[in-house]
Amino acid sequence: MSNIPETGRTPRVRIRLVVIQVLVFSLLLTLGGRLWYLQIRNGQEYTDEAKNNHVQQVVQPAVRGSILDARGVPLADNETRLVVSASRTELMKTKDDGAAVLTRLAGVLGMTPKEVRDKVRLCDSKTPQPCWNGSPYQPIPVTDEATTQQALTIRERAEDFPGITAEPTAVRRYAAPGKANTAQVLGYLSPVTDEEVTKAQDTDSPYLRSDQVGRSGLERTYDKELRGKAGVTRYEVDNLGRVIGEAQNDEAEPGASIVTSIDARVQAVAEYELNKAMETARKEMDRNTNELYKADSGAVVVMEAKTGRIVSMASLPTYDPNAWIGGISAKDYAKLTGKKSNFPLLNRAIQGTAAPGSVFKVISSTAAVNAGYDFDGNYPCPSSYNVGGQTFKNFESQGYGSITIGRALEVSCDTVYYGLAHKEWLKDGGNKPKKNPKDWFYKTAHQFGLGKETGIDLPNEVAGRVPDRRWKQAFYDANKAAWCKQGKKNGTYVEKIAYEGCVEGNKMRAGDSVNYSIGQGDTLVTPIQMATIYAGISNGGTLYDPTVGKAVISGDGRSVREIKPRSHGRLPFTGETRDKIDEALAGVATRGSAAWRFGGWPQDKIPMHAKTGTAEVYGKQTTSWFATYTKEYSIVMTISQGGTGSGASGPAVRNIYNALYGLDASGKQDLKKALLPKPQTTLPKIQPDGSIDAPKIKPYIPEAPAGDGTQALAGALAAVPGRRD
Amino acid sequence: MAGFSVSRYAPERSSWARLTARDSVVRRLDWPLLGSAVALSVIGSLLVWSATRGRDSLTHGDPYYFLFRHVLNTGIGLALMVGTVWLGHRTLRGAVPVLYGISVLLVLAVLTPLGATVNGAHAWIIIGGGFSLQPSEFTKITIILGMAMLLASRVDAGDQLHPDHRTVAKALGVAIVPMAVVMLMPDLGSVMVMAVIVLGVLLASGASNRWVFGLLGAGATGAVAVWQLGLLDEYQIARFAAFANPALDPAGVGYNTNQARIAIGSGGLTGTGLFNGSQTTGQFVPEQQTDFVFTVAGEELGFLGAGLIIVLLGVVLWRACRIARETTELYGTVVAAGIIAWFAFQSFENIGMTLGIMPVAGLPLPFVSYGGSSMFAVWVAIGLLQSIRVQRPITA
């Protein structure tokens, strides 16, 4: 500091200069502190934000894996279509934001310029469809049906079409090989929803906005495997979205293929025969209602008896799964899901339930044996049975005298089971039930896997119902109020039923138990449950989890994961009882209620076992059940409002067996014609390049003369009174 | 007139000896001040380069366009500094009325059709050939010089201890005329700087406390009045709103502040490295070579680099404070104080807005931001500071 106190250096000025200096440096300190706070303390937060700012990703979707039949025939695969796409980032670089390019493109594709513009505009709250819902950095498909000529034009005149690409792209296709539609088993895809994207964000298989997701059937169960991993290229972009560099490039991994146990040829036969059976039934007169049978829906399951693998599974009514590709139209959607549609999306083999009727008697027979009744004992089979003032008749009021349980199974004598069930009901305390009733007939049904999903690898399987005491109580609790409101002691039938329900709906009455023992009443089962049970009887007692998927083969063909059969329990009978039931069921096919359908069957070579069932449904025509098995297969067919078991389903099931074993109508076997005399155990051959061999497939041609003859015979026999299940 | 050698007692010496002699101008220059200012300009040129080399729309495809010009501006600025020292602030004192008059005329010219609008502020004169002039930058200097001349003349003459009320009023008049014009442009940022300059000048001049506090009060009242009467343009209100809550509208008015903060915050301790900042290369921060140049430093050079800029500014201000304290004449003290107030507030406002602690105002960061007018003005100011130091009597 100057030591010369000249003019103007007053203490006031000196102090003020110090004040200024202090102020100045406190400002600088503030800046330094704030800088530290932003960069050091909160630095990470801003680093992340900067990353989001400048990285955009472009997705190359993975090719979805195929769904193959047991021999490698694709049931669902991808076809290559020429997809013309427009890149918005490129278009925006042109002078008029791409307007001229899009107009030229419209000319080439034979679309109007407006159509093209609408396709590539971005969706927002004000923009109606069509518009692009995905990332603006993603090429936007304008059409997936470009011709080669159009694609070539676009490629040759690339300078006229900046930002437009015409590339072969994989699009899902359900090929229906040999007319095997397999719709409900395969399922379908639809675009991922915003919600799903958010939900799956932090999982190990996140969705991309452009993803298609399996919504039902195998497409859903094996969605993760089929989907593969999309390739993602991350670009660094500037504030205008212009690409300034490539940050990261993850190549797409194609999805795995699923080899199923479905045999497309057998599937085609099953579908054809089910449809034929339903059409035939619709020409039959229902003598109870004096109307033609409606045969509104049906299902058939062909299962490998020793593994639980599904060889074919058909459900009618059905639909064309290709309707979902490229977005389903509102009209098609209404057709598939509307009230009038009869719900073709339902897979009735696993989602359709009905009372089992007499096919349930294998369970009642086992229950009786387990309750201590001798299988070979003598049980009266009168034409009717009285319980508490109520008369329960044999199906067609025929009596057989005193017979064994085996014979009761063969001729499907209801009254034998009435008697057994009634005795058990009385033992359990009757109207004043014991504390721990044995409930043999109900317990056995549970042990056979009823009232529970079989665990098939298809989504939304239905559990069905065993109307045991617990269910009765729960059902009563839920409905008591309504029943008591509606019920009248001396009202109409419905009112009377409601009144009874109100008074004693929670009680297991004698009538309930008796009716239950022959598979009528409140019991509900699915065809897949019955197929599992009959396969279980065939294989010696193992209840397999039915499986459609047989192996998962990675996209490059290098890794093969087999899906092994798994069991969910054993049938509750001894080997001896099984053998006796087996014998009785063979009897059904040779001399019992299904014998008329198996005329000429080579029983010595291919022992056939069958049980017919006709379930009564209040207010509807009877449900036809036909459960059969051989050593290799179990086939169960059911037709809602289709009449009797053997009547409606008999010829169809036999024709499926004929196709499997190569039999003609007279029972002569020609192994060359046999589609699958033994279940397919090997997997299709995988080529070194990862492709899977697929044999050619011929559509199913039903044996015309013999087939017609059978049908005619069926018609004639159905009219004969006394034929029964 | 005074040349490089100002000592009247200096005997004849060789030119080298004259330059290196203890009392020579070169030896008496404040080298830390000069060094810091040059360092800031060099850092500035790198930052400007990094911010603009990809902006083809601005550079006409020449990535060195702004680098070259910033270096050129710095060179011209250095020449202006040398010229200012050569002339000496005392000599310039005589020319102050003329310079002041010219600057007021230039500012007025902006309001004529000669003026051009950039970013909502009608503050430019387009000269042509890609050059433009922002007269308000020079007005900052002439306000300082004009006020200092009035306030210090009678004190330096020994007539009075402190400037009297009449003098202070006159000095305020000198400031208010160009400020009013700049306010009309409207260039609110410059007006704010000028107001702070006025305050600094008055403080250092020893004007009575009543003036100082009265002005502070008037400033506050004025700000409220301006706000209430809606004298601000919409873009200015928007900037204040965005300052209060940057999350308000991240795509609109809050965009600048938000992106600036992301850029700085993502730099961390050492930054991403020059030319490697994604915010900078991606051009997410608008006006990044001028008003938001500090964000380039924050992102690419990190806390160390950005901190260095603050430290260098600190050195400049520290040397300026020393010069203000050590000069014996009030004129020099007041001029230095005015420059301190100017640099300090403008730096604080500029960096503060990028850090989100000050509202956005279009002010350049001294030495660092791209812009000729600003660069020339701050180097002339450095020249004035050097001259004040050079012309003080040697002690000890």
Image (cartoon, rainbow, N blue to C red):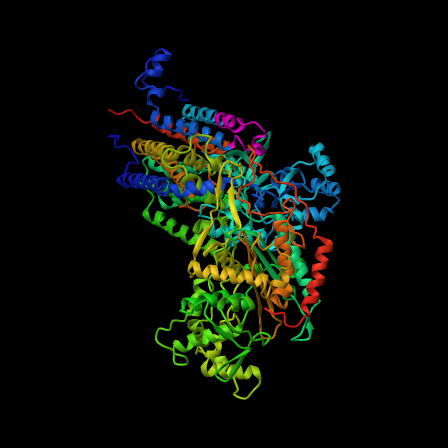
Q: Is B47 placed left or right of B112 in the picture?
A: left
Count how many numbered circles sit on residues in the image. Answer: 0
- Residue drawn at x 57%, y 49% is A262
Q: Is the stretch drawn in magenta largely helix, strand or loop?
A: helix
Tell me if residue A488 is in the magenta stretch. no
Q: Is residue B374 visible?
A: yes
- Residue drawn at x 36%, y 10% is B14
| Magenta stretch in the rendered image | B52-72
Question: Which quadrant would residue A652 be assigned to in this image?
Answer: bottom right
Say above or below: A422 vs A314: below
Q: x, y (%) of residue B188?
A: 48, 45
Say above or below: B81 vs A719: above
Q: Quadrant of the C terminus of chain A?
A: bottom right
Q: Is residue A327 visible?
A: no
Going by the picture, which residue comes out furthest to the top? B14
Question: Which quadrant would residue B93 be assigned to in this image?
Answer: top left
Foreground of the two, B171 or A79: A79
Q: Is B101 placed left or right of B167 in the picture?
A: right
Foreground of the two, A601 or B363: A601
Say above or below: A577 vs A413: above
Question: Which quadrant would residue A31 be assigned to in this image?
Answer: top left
Q: x, y (%) of residue B314?
A: 34, 34
Q: Quadrant of the N terminus of chain A?
A: top left
Say above or below: A231 vs A589: above
Foreground of the two, A672 or B39: A672
Tell me if residue B66 is in the magenta stretch. yes
Q: x, y (%) of residue A469?
A: 42, 73
Q: Is A502 placed left or right of B161 in the picture?
A: right
Q: x, y (%) of residue A135?
A: 56, 45
